[in-house]
């Protein structure tokens, strides 16, 4: 006949079994919760909000290109990302916050969208696009705003100075004196422009203006002592209102102008290197696809990786210049190392 274990031993045995079962159940619950949280984070980062202040022109081109790039399975092995377009209501400084729920990153398009996103706290990482570098830095400085670099970044609209200066060397070999007419927006570039020019064995002559009536007198002084005018984005100096008088002045002095857009080349600049909204969208999509699940850190602000070159052949003939093809110029610039500005 089997003897029953002592009462004390039986109690300890039963308690041990119950404890093991409870621990197993707890571990299983924690594992399920962890998987659920990971799944939640993965879903969040798969959705990108596109913040638009308007839906027209370059903004529409960027939006369409980014949508295509993020959803293309050939470009996004393992699945693309969902793009949720969030438009700012007319006259509003805040979007519908419900539309931002569950997103893993925000792409703010243009200066107005960036200014609004910069004022928010606790939002997902914000990538700003179609914003010149000087505008990006100015908006961040407004009101003493500070944002963690890993949570707020940009792909600049303007080209790196080294790329623009190397274009000058490609189309105007032997020319050394580069004129820079600076306004309120572009003047902060001068400390970066000087060493960039010096590295290429060039010289810079510059003047700064604060209003439109000062432009032509200052430009005339610069063109009389330089070989080429480098146009830098500025809301006073290089605008639709000033373009005609600036270009006519360069023609009068028989000095070429290197622009920063296809439009300037069409209007009479000799050449330009620039990035289209679709090219910037391609770079933005590559950056967003590379973000891991969760609140991933963004890289430091970037210059455009993809770009085009335009040449005005009529202007080249008028100045008796033999300019290589746009394809040859683009290939030459793409093979040159970019020096961080």
Image (cartoon, rainbow, N blue to C red):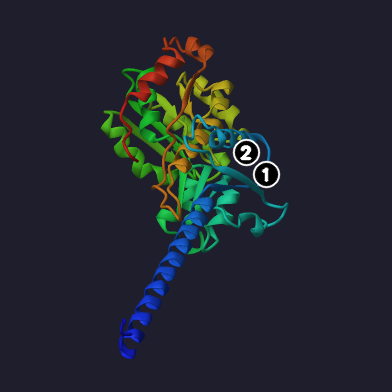
In this view of the protein, which residue sits in the foreground, 8 or 190? Answer: 8
Q: Few, some or many C-alpha atoms within 10 Å of disc 2 (few <14, some 14-19, many ≥20)?
A: some
| Image spot of residue 182 (x, y percent) | 46, 40
Residue with the mark numbered 2? 59
Which image quadrant is residue 15 in?
bottom left
Q: Is residue 183 above or below residue 163?
A: below
| Image spot of residue 340 (x, y percent) | 33, 39
| Disc ID at residue 150 | none
**Is residue 247 shown left or right of residue 31?**
right
Residue with the mark numbered 1? 54
In this view of the protein, which residue sits in the foreground, 196 or 187? Answer: 196
Q: Which of marks 2 and 1 is nearer the N terminus?
A: 1
| Image spot of residue 100 (x, y percent) | 61, 55
The image shows a total of numbered marks equal to 2
Residue at 55 percent across and 26 percent down: it is 264
Q: Few, some or many C-alpha atoms within 10 Å of disc 1 (few <14, some 14-19, many ≥20)?
A: some
Gap between marks 2 and 1 measured at Cα: 7 Å
Which image quadrant is residue 171 in?
top left
Residue at 40 percent across and 43 percent down: it is 189
Residue at 41 percent across and 54 percent down: it is 150
In this view of the protein, which residue sits in the foreground, 181 or 23? Answer: 23
Furthest residue in direction right, as rendered: 90
Are the two marked residues, 2 and 1, in contact with CB atoms closer than 8 angstroms? yes
Report whether residue 145 is seen.
no
Indicate the secondary structure of the residue bearing disc 2.
helix
Residue at 36 percent across and 86 percent down: it is 11
Indicate the secondary structure of the residue bearing disc 1.
loop
Report whether residue 163 is seen.
yes
| Image spot of residue 234 (x, y percent) | 52, 40
Q: Quadrant of the C terminus?
A: top left
Q: Is residue 141 above or below residue 62?
A: below
């Amino acid at each position: 006949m089997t003897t029953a274990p002592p009462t004390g031993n039986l109690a300890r045995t039963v308690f041990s079994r119950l404890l093991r079962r409870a621990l197993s159940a707890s571990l299983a619950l924690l594992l399920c919760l962890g998987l659920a949280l990971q799944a939640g984070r993965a879903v969040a980062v798969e959705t990108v909000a596109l913040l638009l202040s308007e839906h027209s022109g370059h903004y529409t081109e960027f939006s369409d290109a980014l949508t295509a790039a993020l959803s293309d399975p050939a470009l996004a092995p393992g699945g693309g990302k969902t793009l949720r377009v969030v438009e700012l209501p007319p006259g509003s400084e805040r979007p519908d916050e419900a539309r931002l729920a569950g997103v893993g990153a925000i792409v703010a398009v243009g200066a107005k969208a960036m200014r609004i996103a910069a004022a928010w706290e606790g939002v997902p990482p914000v990538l700003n696009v179609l914003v010149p570098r000087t505008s990006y830095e100015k908006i961040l400085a407004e009101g003493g705003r500070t944002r963690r670099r890993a949570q707020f970044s940009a792909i600049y609209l303007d080209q790196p100075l080294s790329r623009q200066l190397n274009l000058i060397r490609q189309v105007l070999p032997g020319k050394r004196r580069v004129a820079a007419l600076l306004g309120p927006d572009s003047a902060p570039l001068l400390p970066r422009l000087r060493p960039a020019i010096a590295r290429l064995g060039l010289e810079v002559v510059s003047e700064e203006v604060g209003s439109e009536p000062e432009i032509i007198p200052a430009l005339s002084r610069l063109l009389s002592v330089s070989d080429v005018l480098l146009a830098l984005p500025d809301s006073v100096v290089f605008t639709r209102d000033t373009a005609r008088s600036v270009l006519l002045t360069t023609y009068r002095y028989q000095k070429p102008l290197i622009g920063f857009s296809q439009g300037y080349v069409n209007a009479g600049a000799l050449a330009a290197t620039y990035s289209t909204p679709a090219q910037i969208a391609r770079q933005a999509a590559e950056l967003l696809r590379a973000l891991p699940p969760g609140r991933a850190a963004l890289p430091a602000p970037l210059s455009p990786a993809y770009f085009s070159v335009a040449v005005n052949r009529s202007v080249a003939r008028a100045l008796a210049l033999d300019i290589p093809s746009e394809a040859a110029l683009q290939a030459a610039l793409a093979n040159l190392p970019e020096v961080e500005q």
